């Protein structure tokens, strides 16, 4: 257990969102996407707009002076936060994504065709796409650290370093798996090489102290909203001599010293990289976030997070029908897994019904997720305000989901020519009589078991457009009546499809057209509880079925 001197409950009490009536029972495990904001950050943003709102620099009035002082004070705080040598090495960006785009554009314009950029398979798209764009523009070559099932073997980094390697851009922590590379080992492999080393520290900064001088990297980027700060602002650290030699990426106000009709002179560091009006309210919030973190016991907070992380991995590893992708070792606070017998989005929806916030999808790390053999994962990520009770409730909800979604094995996959499913045992009144969303969800999951797997219909031609999870629908008309068959990897989609087909399968076109199925969906309360994308999935199935009926198309 965590040292008694650290209290996640006390830390949580500093975050107003959790004090709101609708959020008092919220279990927030989506911190890798964005953390919540403490009161000092919110107050600083409000205070700026109430008392100091004005544009910075090049103005003599007191509000502008106050705003300028705030920005430059925040810059010095950021330099201290990352242990940069001075504020001249700190550039404010909209976030890590913009910072990486700045580096890609400013560094690559001086490279030659055939020069190489080294990346890894666990990078966020923001640390892949900009380099891909520059490689296409300048004829550069992308190389990747050797990997196993998408997980890089950073001790083999040297195998992809060569005479033409000019840039190495690697994550300081995977946003999909939580994996924290051994940055000291990477630094030793890059020492004495003529290249630029960039660290994407978006996940790193929230969980441990960052010392860019000790790391030895040339550039470091992070986003404030990942470490309890506001959205819309991030940090780019760069060695002063390197940034002084780099051309600016964007042009406009604030980044110039003098402008003529045919050429301009740029401002000195760091302002030559800060074109346009800065997000001043967010910078005020960033300063407050840095001060807030400075007041915390970061080591005790990290120890608490790691203890919970170890426990979550240990408990989830004992559950059947669940595949863990993350590992507790060298992990920055993420548990990533995929249910074997259900779609990850189904579990996410179930958790949301319990007021447990997680994230599901590829997490802007598609190459990694694909290499792992999954299409999507469930990601739960902890923070300093995550409590042991939060973790226990999360585990209980996952266990209960497994119980209600366990396949019964009574419906076999159809082979050969497709066959419809027998839905005669489904009773609409039973679904309507369920009093709570959790009970209605259980009933839908029970209905989903009436839909057999139909490999034969899983073709691009039968794919229903508009469903969050893939679904396939086929149709035939016999004797003036319309018959349908459906399949999906999602249990929720299967349940919704069973609801739809229970109303229209085996009916005539006139009977189907007389039904108000959208009203039925709303009356059952499904629209209220399902996500927009899930509701759209039901309507997409309905639209496709009605298209078949109206146009007489058959499989």
Image (cartoon, rainbow, N blue to C red):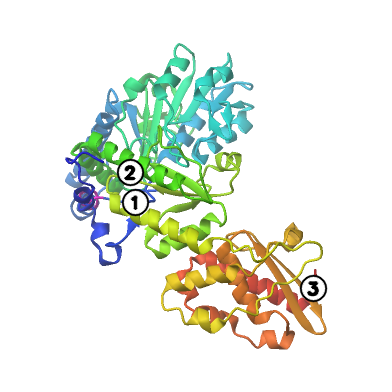
Q: Is residue 340 above or below residue 72?
A: below
In front: 507, or 218? Answer: 507
Task: Specify which label sits upstream in the sequence, 1 or 2.
Answer: 2
Mark 2 lies on a secondary structure that is helix
**Mark 3 or mark 2, which has the lower sequence index?**
2
* Helix, strand or loop at mark 1: helix
- Image position of 527 (left or right of 208): right
Left-right relation of 172 to 321: left
Residue occupied by mark 2: 308
**Where 34 sits versus 101, above or below?**
below
Mark 1 touching mark 2, by CB under 8 A? yes
Circle on res. 50: none
Relative image position of residue 346 (x, y in whole percent)? 52, 60
Residue 69 lies, in percent from the top left, at 20, 38
Q: Nearer the viewer, residue 342 or 463?
A: 342
Q: Residues within 10 Å of mark 2 (few under 14, many from 20)?
A: many
Magenta segment includes 451:
no
């Amino acid at each position: 257990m965590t040292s008694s001197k650290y209290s996640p409950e006390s830390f949580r009490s500093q975050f107003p969102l959790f004090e709101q009536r609708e959020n008092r029972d919220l279990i927030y495990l989506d911190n890798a996407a964005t953390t919540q904001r403490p009161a000092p950050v919110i107050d600083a943003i409000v205070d700026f707009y109430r008392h100091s709102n004005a544009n910075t620099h090049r103005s003599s009035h007191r509000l502008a002076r106050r705003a300028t002082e705030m920005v430059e004070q925040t810059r010095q705080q950021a330099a201290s936060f990352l242990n940069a040598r001075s504020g001249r090495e700190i550039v404010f960006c909209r976030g890590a994504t913009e910072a990486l785009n700045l580096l890609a554009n400013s560094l690559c314009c001086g490279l030659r065709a055939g020069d190489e950029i080294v990346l890894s398979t666990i990078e966020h798209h923001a640390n892949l796409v900009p380099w891909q764009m520059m490689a296409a523009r300048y004829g550069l070559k992308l190389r990747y650290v050797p990997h196993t099932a998408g997980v890089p073997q950073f001790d083999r980094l040297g195998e992809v370093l060569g005479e033409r390697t000019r840039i190495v851009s690697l994550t300081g922590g995977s946003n999909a798996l939580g994996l924290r590379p051994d940055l000291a080992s990477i630094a030793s492999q890059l020492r004495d090489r003529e290249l630029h080393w960039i660290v994407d520290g978006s996940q790193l900064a929230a969980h441990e102290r960052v010392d860019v001088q000790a790391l030895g990297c040339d550039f470091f980027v992070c986003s404030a909203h990942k470490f309890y700060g506001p959205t819309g602002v991030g940090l780019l650290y760069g060695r002063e001599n390197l940034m002084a030699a780099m051309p600016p990426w964007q042009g406009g106000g604030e980044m110039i010293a003098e402008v003529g009709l045919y050429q301009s002179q740029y401002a000195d560091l760091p302002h030559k990289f800060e074109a346009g009006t800065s997000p001043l309210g967010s910078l005020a919030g960033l300063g407050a976030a840095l001060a807030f973190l400075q007041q915390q016991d970061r080591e005790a907070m990290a120890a608490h997070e790691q203890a919970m992380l170890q426990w979550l991995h240990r408990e989830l590893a004992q559950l059947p029908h669940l595949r863990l992708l993350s590992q507790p070792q060298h992990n920055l606070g993420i548990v990533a897994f995929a249910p074997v017998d259900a779609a990850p989005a189904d579990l996410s929806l179930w958790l949301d019904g319990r007021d447990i916030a997680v994230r599901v999808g590829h997490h802007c790390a598609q190459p990694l997720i694909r290499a792992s053999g999954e299409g999507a994962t469930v990601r739960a990520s902890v923070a300093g305000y995550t409590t042991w009770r939060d973790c226990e409730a999360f585990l209980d909800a996952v266990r209960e989901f497994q119980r209600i979604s366990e396949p019964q094995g009574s419906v076999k996959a159809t082979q050969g020519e497709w066959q419809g499913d027998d839905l005669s045992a489904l009773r609409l009144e039973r679904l309507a009589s369920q009093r709570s969303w959790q009970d209605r969800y259980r009933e839908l999951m029970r209905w989903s078991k009436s839909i057999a797997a139909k490999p034969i219909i899983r073709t691009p031609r039968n794919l229903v457009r508009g469903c969050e999870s893939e679904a396939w629908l086929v149709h035939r008309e016999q004797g003036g009546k319309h018959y349908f068959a459906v399949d999906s990897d999602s249990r929720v989609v299967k349940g919704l499809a069973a609801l739809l087909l229970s109303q229209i399968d085996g009916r005539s076109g006139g009977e189907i057209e007389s039904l108000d199925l959208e009203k039925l969906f709303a009356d059952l309360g499904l629209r209220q509880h399902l996500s927009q994308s899930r509701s759209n999935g039901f309507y997409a199935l309905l639209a496709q079925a009605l298209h078949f009926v109206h146009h007489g198309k058959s499989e």
